[in-house]
C-alpha cells in the first residue's frame, strides 16, 4: 500500500500507540508505596479499572448517561473500585492525581520512530476515545508528534458510534477512502472500513496483559497487517 492516495493517517491511541497497562500499573504501585499501602494486586486493580471503561462509554452512546468525557468516566470507575482494592484511605487529591496517570501514558518503543516516518510523508493525528485534554497532555508528556487531535470530545460520542467515524471523515475533507486508520483493535478497523476508510492493523498481543483474549491477530484482510508502527511505516513509506 502506498501513501500516494492517502491524505491523512489517524491512529487509535490506547494500546496501539501507548502501553497504557504497564504505565498505569507503575503509577498506581508508586502511589501505593508513597502512601504505605500494602498487599494490593496492582495488575488486577488496573485491569478492573480498565474493565469499566467500555460499559461506561456504551451507556453514554445509548443515552443512558449524559455526555461526559472519559476523564470523568475513569474517575467515577476509580471511585467504584477503590474500596474493593483497599484504597479507602486515598484522599480526593490522591485519586485525582492517580486518574491523571492516563494523561501520562508512554508509547511503545516502535511508536515514535514509526510516527515520525509517516508524518514526514502525510499529516498524522489521533482518533481516540480519550478526551481532547488528555490527548494533548499525553502528547506533551510523551513527545507524540501529532499534527492534529481528534477525540470523542469533538463528536460527543465514543467509538464505535457512527458519529465519530463520520465526523472524522467530514473534518478531514470528506473523502473516506483517502483516510487510513491505524489501530490494534479489530472492531475499530471494522467500523472504519464500514464507513469507507483504509485500514492498518497493529498486532499488540500484550496490550491487555498476559491473559489477553482478544485482538491477538488480524480478523479480516486489512489493508496493512503488521506488528508495529514501524512496520506500518515500512508498508506506507518503503
Image (spheres, rainbow, N blue to C red):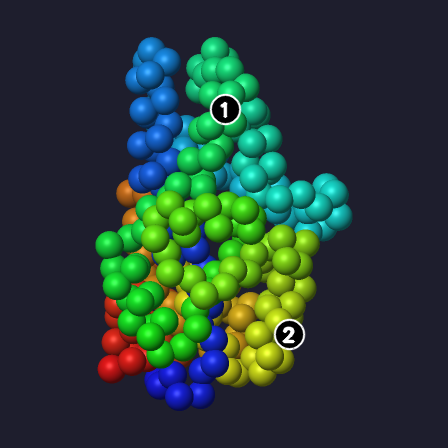
Label 1: which residue? 95
Residue at the spot x=41%, y=52% of the render? 139
Rendered image: mark on residue 135:
none
Q: Quadrant of residue 151?
A: bottom right
In this picture, residue 234 sits left or right of residue 104: left
In this orientation, which residue lies closer to the viewer: 102 or 1?
102
In this picture, residue 152 sits left or right of residue 6: right
Residue at the spot x=47%, y=35% of the render? 100
Q: Is residue 184 above or below residue 121?
A: above
Label 2: which residue? 170
Residue at the spot x=45%, y=65% of the render? 147
Q: Secondary structure at mark 2?
A: helix
Q: Secondary structure at mark 1?
A: helix
Residue at the spot x=57%, y=25% of the render? 80
Q: Quadrant of the N terminus?
A: bottom left
Q: Which residue sits furthest bottom? A: 4
- Whole-angstrom CA distance, mark 1 to mark 2, is 38 Å
Q: Is residue 186 above or below residue 171?
A: above
Where residue 203 sits in the image (x, y, percent)?
Answer: 32, 61
Which is nearer the N-term, disc 1 or disc 2? Answer: 1
Q: How many marks?
A: 2
The answer to whether residue 139 is seen in the rendering is: yes
Amino acid at each position: 500500500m502506498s501513501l500516494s492516495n492517502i491524505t491523512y493517517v489517524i491512529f487509535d491511541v490506547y494500546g496501539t500507540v501507548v502501553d497504557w497497562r504497564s504505565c498505569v500499573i507503575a503509577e498506581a504501585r508508586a502511589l501505593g508505596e508513597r502512601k504505605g499501602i500494602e498487599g494490593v494486586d496492582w495488575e488486577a486493580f488496573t485491569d478492573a479499572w480498565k474493565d469499566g471503561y467500555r460499559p461506561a462509554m456504551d451507556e453514554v452512546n445509548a443515552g443512558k448517561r449524559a455526555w461526559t468525557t472519559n476523564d470523568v468516566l475513569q474517575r467515577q470507575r476509580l471511585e467504584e473500585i477503590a474500596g474493593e482494592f483497599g484504597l479507602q484511605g486515598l484522599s480526593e487529591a490522591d485519586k485525582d492525581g492517580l486518574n491523571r496517570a492516563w494523561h501520562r501514558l508512554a508509547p511503545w518503543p516502535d511508536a515514535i520512530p514509526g510516527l515520525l516516518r509517516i508524518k514526514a510523508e502525510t499529516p498524522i493525528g489521533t482518533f481516540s476515545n480519550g478526551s481532547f485534554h488528555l490527548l494533548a497532555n499525553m502528547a506533551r508528556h510523551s513527545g507524540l508528534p501529532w499534527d492534529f487531535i481528534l477525540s470523542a470530545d469533538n463528536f460527543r460520542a465514543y467509538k464505535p458510534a457512527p458519529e465519530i467515524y463520520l465526523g472524522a471523515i467530514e473534518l478531514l475533507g470528506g473523502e473516506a477512502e483517502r483516510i487510513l486508520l491505524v489501530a490494534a483493535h479489530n472492531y475499530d478497523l471494522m467500523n472504519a472500513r464500514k464507513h469507507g476508510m483504509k485500514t492498518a492493523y497493529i498486532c499488540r498481543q500484550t496490550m491487555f496483559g498476559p491473559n489477553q483474549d482478544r485482538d491477538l491477530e488480524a480478523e479480516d484482510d486489512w489493508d496493512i497487517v503488521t506488528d508495529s508502527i514501524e512496520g506500518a511505516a515500512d508498508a506506507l513509506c518503503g
